Amino acid sequence: MSPSVKKSNTIQCMAKTGTLDRTDFDIIAALRKNARLPNNKLAQKVGIAPSTCLERVRRLVATGALKGFYAEVDPDTVGIGLQAMITVQLRRHSRDLVESFRSHAITLTEVLAVYHVAGSNDFLVHAAVRDADHLRDLAMDAFTTRPEVSRIETNLIFEYRRTHELPNYKLEAMKDGGEDPS
């Protein structure tokens, strides 16, 4: 189904997510900033009744527009003393090797995220470890021993800041009165 802007200023998204309007986008933005926002405060923030808000959030979850609600945890609290981004280059870029590495990497306790990327590397792996010795052991035992891995490079993370904002190109299209770019 092709996305289109309707007279009611709603955007028809992929069949999986259904129709999202400005209120849905406001709910998503508010929850992205604070997923623990009580329903009555969320409803007030977006200008709808609490019962309507609750139903909209349930629909956003059911359709997959909202994939989950998570807590941001201070790494020191759980003993994480060092984080790194590890670039991984496979010996060959085939579907089987990509899937094999991805399946392996995502099961590792130290791995926070796995990105399949374009360019000279095939994967970017965000790892969280206790210390430099733990990082060395992870690199040597979990990555360089894999038959599909050609080379790795480790980049230490000194500091990171995460934004709670996401660009919303569908809402921009609604405001401009133009077509949804997707």
Image (spheres, grey):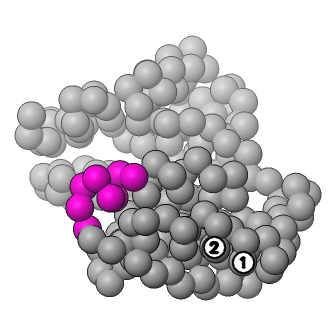
86 or 28, nearer to the observer: 86
User: Can residue 66 be spotted in the picture?
Assistant: yes
**Where does the image place residue 168, in percent across and percent down from the top left?**
37, 56
Q: Is residue 39 depicted above or below 52 in this figure?
A: below
Q: Pointer 2: residues within 10 angstroms few (<14), some, or many (20+)?
A: some
Q: Which residue is labeled 2 in the image?
A: 139
**Along the horizontal axis of the image, is 96 left or right of 149?**
left
Q: CA distance from mark 2 to mark 1?
A: 5 Å
> Could you tell me which residue is drawn at 54 percent across and 68 percent down?
145
Q: Which mark is residue 34?
A: none
Q: Position of residue 64 (x, y in %)?
A: 41, 31
Q: Closer to the camera, 84 or 57?
A: 84
Amino acid type for the residue under numbered disc 2? Ala
| Image quarter of residue 36 | top right
Q: Is residue 110 left or right of residue 78?
A: left
The answer to if 116 sits in the magenta stretch is: no
Q: Quadrant of residue 8?
A: top left
Q: Is residue 66 placed above or below 113 in the rendered structure? A: above
Dots 2, 1 in contact, CB < 8 A: yes
Looking at the rendering, in which quadrant would you find the N terminus? top left
Looking at the picture, does residue 47 appear above or below residue 148? above
Q: Which residue is mark 1?
A: 136
* Magenta stretch, main secondary structure class: helix
Q: Is residue 59 left or right of residue 33?
A: left
SS under mark 2: helix
**Residue lying at 28% horizontally and 53% vertically, measured from the top left:** 96
Q: Residues within 10 Å of mark 1 (few under 14, many from 20)?
A: few
